[in-house]
Amino acid sequence: MTHLVIVGNGISGVTVARHVRKRSDMKITIISAETKHFFSRTALMYAYMGHMKFENMKPYEDWFWEKNRIELVFDFVSKVDTDSKKLSLKSGKEISYDKLVLATGSKYNKFGWPGQDLDGVQGLFSWQDLELMEKNTANPVNRAVIVGGGLIGIEMAEMLLTRKIPVTFLVRESRYWGGILPLEEGTLVKRHILEHGIDLRLNTELGEILPDENGRVRAVITKDGTEIPCQFVGLTAGVSPNVKFLEDSKVETGRGILVNDYLETNVPDVYSLGDCAEIKTPEGERNRLEQLWYTGRMQGEVLAKTITGERTIYERGIWFNSAKFLDIEYQTYGQVFGELREGEAKFYWEHEDHKHCLKVVFDEKSHVVIGLNVFGIRLRHDVCEKWLKEQRNLEYFLENLVEANFDPEFYESFEQSVADAYNTQFGKTLKAKTKKGFFASIFG
Amino acid sequence: MNATTPYFEETHEHKDLSGVKKIGLALVSLGFLLLFVSASGIAKEQPTLFSILIFGSIMVGTLVYVLPQLKEGPAGIKNNNIFFDSMTSKGAAAWVAGIFITGFYVLLYWFPQYLENWIRILDPLSFALSGGPASQWFLYGTFYTIAVVFMGVRMIVKYRHNRYQIIRTASVMFFQLGFGFLIPNILKAFNQPEFYFTYFWPLKYDYLFPNSFEWLMSSGGIGIFMFFWGAVMTFIATPVLTYFFGKRWYCSWVCGCGGLAETLGDPYRQLSDKSLKAWQIERWMIHGVLAFITVTTIIVWLNSSFGGGILGDLSNQFSQTYGFLIGAAFSGVIGVGFYPIMGSRVWCRFGCPMAAVLGIIQKFWSRFRITTNGGQCISCGNCSTYCEMGIDVRAYAQRGQNIIRASCVGCGICAAVCPRGVLKLENGKVEGRYELNDYVKV
C-alpha cells in the first residue's frame, strides 16, 4: 500500500491528509514536533488572552484521526533522504515513504539585531512560542516593545494589553502595515492603535537590544538612539519558510521549497505547500510565497487530487484575505496595493467614527474595479468575487453594495453615505440600493 | 518622548477604574450579607427598609461594577481572561457559586419553610403589586427578574458595538420584567388568574392540562382568553413564527429561561460541551422529555375524559413524576444551579420540550440559518467556544456549510465573536439552505 508521509500538521498538511483520505485508501502518516494534534494557529492569541483553551483550538476531536486512519507521529524530522525515500527522526526512528509532503510552515524572522537571542526576546508562530511567551511575561513586565508593524505585531500588542502590559510598537514604515495598506487605511488603523493606548512609533527601527546582568532584555535602543526600557521584546518583522532541515537533501530550496504550479518539487514524489513552499513563476517575476491560512488550505485541496492521481494545477483565483486590527475587522478582495499602480484610480469613503471605511481601486479609464479594502463592514465573499470576475465598474459596486453586505441584522446601513461620498468626489448623482423593507425581508 | 515620531495624535491613556468596580462588588456583597442577616427574622420588623437595602445595594452595586466598562477602552469583543478566572472557568469560585445556587433551588422547591424570613421581607412589594403576601415564587420571581434586568445591562454594555445583541437583550429584559413578573402579579391584584402569556405548552406543560382548562374556563372572559391564547401560541404561533424566524424568536428573544441564560448565564456560555458525544446525548434527552410530556398530557386528558375511571391513579403519577423530575429538578435545580459548571443552557439544550418542538420545526421547515461567508473562515474556534448550545459552529464554517441545527437558539454570539466576518444569522428561502458554498472543497 502506498504510504503518504506528511511533515507538518498545520492547516496545509492536515488538509492534504483529509482530502487524500476522502479520495484514497493509502496509508497516511503526519509527523509533527509541535503538538500531537492539529490546532488552529490563528487562535494562538486567543489562548494567551484567556478567550480559549487548547481544547477549543483543535478543529477536530482527538478520535477523528484514528477514525480516519491518519497516523500521528509526534517527532522531529531531522533528515530527508530522497534516494532511499527515508526520513530520519530525532528520536532515532526512521520512516519510509512512497510519497512525501513537506508542509513545515514558517519561522519568525530575526535580522541579526544585536541582542536578538536574549531572554525575553521572541517572536510568535508556534505553540512553543506561545508557551515561551507565557514564561517571558510571567514575571512583572513594565513595558514590552514590539518590533515590526504587521499582523502578528498588532496581535501581540493586543495579547499583551490583556495582561495589562504597556506596549511600545516600533514600525519601520511611515504607516502601519505600510507595504500592504494604503495611506488612508493605515491612518485609520493607526488612530485605532493609539486609541488602545499603544505607544506607536512610526518611522522607527530597532537598533539594538540591551541585556541586564542575567542576560535578560532590559531595554532596546532605536536606530535614532532612543533607549526604551523594557522587559519583553516581540520580534514580529515577518516570517520565512522553515526549510533548514532540508539543507543536506536533494530537494531544491530558495527562500522556501521550490515548487511548480502543481506543488511538485524537483524530486519525484516529493511535494510542498503552504508557508514553506515557494511557487516558481515565469521568468522575470518574483517567486510567490503564500503565507496565509486560506492559501494553505486551498493548496491542500488541490495537492490531494494530484497525489491521488488527478494531477491538478493550483490557481489561487481572485485574491481575498482578512484580518482584525484590535476591534476593527478588515477584508480585502481583488488587488489593492499600498500605492496605486500605473493606470489605477481610487475611491475612498470613511465613516465619521473612523472605524468604518471602504477603498475601491479601479481602472482609471474603464472604471472596472480591480480590488477593494473594507474596514468595520462585513462583505460577502461570493458577491465580491462574482462582481470582480464580471469586471463590474465602480458605480455598479457602489450602487449594489447592499447586496454584498454581510453585517449582522439591525446594523447601521452605510450604502447611501458611501454613494454620497462618491457623488461628491466624482460629481455624480448615484443612489445606492437600500435594504429590503420589513415585509420583503420576511416573505422575500 | 521621541521627537522624530511623526504622528499627530497622542496615545490615548485609559483610566484605571478597577477601584470603582471594587466598590460595586462590595455593594453587591453587602446586599447578600444583609440577605443573610435577614434570614434570622430581624428583617420582618422592617421589611420595606430591608428590601430596599438588600435589593438596592445588589442592583446599584451591579451597575457600579458594570458601567465603568464603558470608559475602560473601545467597544469590541473582550472575552479577556475568561479561562483564567476561577468563576468562569470551573474553578473553586464556580463550584461555590454552583453549589450555592443549586442549594437555593432545592430549598425553594422542596423546603420553602427555611426561606420564610426572606419571603416575608418581600411582603411590601408583593402587596403593592398583587395585593397579597409574598410566596416563595414571588421571592424567586423577584430574584430572577433582577438578575435578568441587571445582568442584561451588563450584556448590553459588553456588546454595545453590536445592535443585534442590544435589541435582543432589551427584548428578554422587557419580556421578563413585564410578562414574567409585573403582569402576572398585577392580574392577581385584579382577582384574575396569575397567567404567564410568554409560556406555553409544552414548556409550561400544565397550561394544556385539564385542570388548567377548568381553572381558566371558570375565571370568566379573561380566563377563556388565556386558555385560547396558550393553545393558539402552541399550535399556530409557534410553527408560524419559527418558520419565518427560526426558534430564536422564542428562545433568545422572549423566553424567561432563555432570558436568564443570556444575561446571568452569559459569563458561562463557553462551558458548554462541544463534543459529538454531548450532541448524541442531547438528542436522546431532549426528544425523550418531549415524548414524556406528550404522553403525560394525553394520559391526563384521557383520564379526565373518562372521569378517572380507567387509568385510575396512573395519570396522577405521570404528571407528578414529570413535575418533580423535569419541571423542578431539571429545569430549575440543574438548569440554573449548574450554570457555573456546565454552561448556561443545560436545560434548554438537554431538557426543554418547547426547545425540542421549536428545534424540529427549525431543522425541517424554517427560513432561518446561519450563513458562512465564502472561504473566509480561519478555523480559530471562537464561534464554537462561545456557542452556549455546544454546537461546533466551526465544523460547519470551515466547510462552507450553513449552520442549520435544531438546537441553535439564534443568540448571534458566534457571529459577534467571529474575527473574520464569516457568520451571519439570516432568514431566506427554504430551498437550497442546506447547500454548501463553493469556496471550500469539503
Image (cartoon, grey):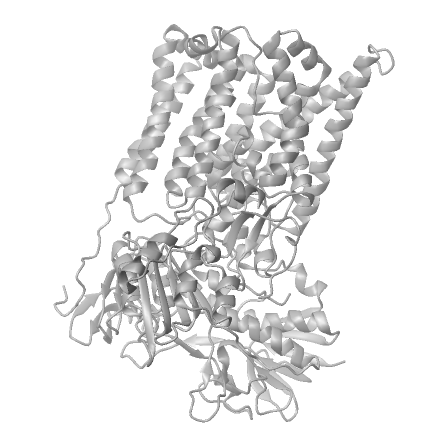
**Quarter of image, res B68:** top left
Q: Quarter of the image containing the N terminus of chain A?
A: bottom right
Seen from the viewer's position, the closer of residues A22 and A97 is A22
Q: Please, which residue is most extreme toward the left here?
A: B3
Image height of A260 relative to B46, above or below = below
Please provide percent x and percent y for residue A374.
Answer: 38, 61
Does residue A180 appear anywhere in the picture? Answer: yes
Residue in the image at 60% along x and 32% along y: B334
Does residue B86 appear anywhere in the picture? Answer: no
Residue in the image at 85% along x and 16% along y: B311
Image height of B16 relative to A65, above or below = above
**Quarter of image, res A251:** bottom right
Tally of marks:
0
Residue in the image at 27% along x and 43% along y: B71
**Drawn side of residue A102 relative to residue B62, left or right:** right
Q: Please, which residue is most extreme toward the right here?
A: B310
Please provide percent x and percent y for residue A261.
Answer: 56, 85
Please provide percent x and percent y for residue B13.
Answer: 21, 51
Seen from the viewer's position, the closer of residues B380 and B186 is B186
Please provide percent x and percent y for residue B363.
Answer: 67, 44
Image height of B383 relative to B168, above or below = below
Residue in the image at 73% along x and 20% along y: B319
Image height of B353 relative to B161, above or below = above
Seen from the viewer's position, the closer of residues A178 and A343 is A343
**Drawn side of residue B382 relative to residue A221, left or right:** right
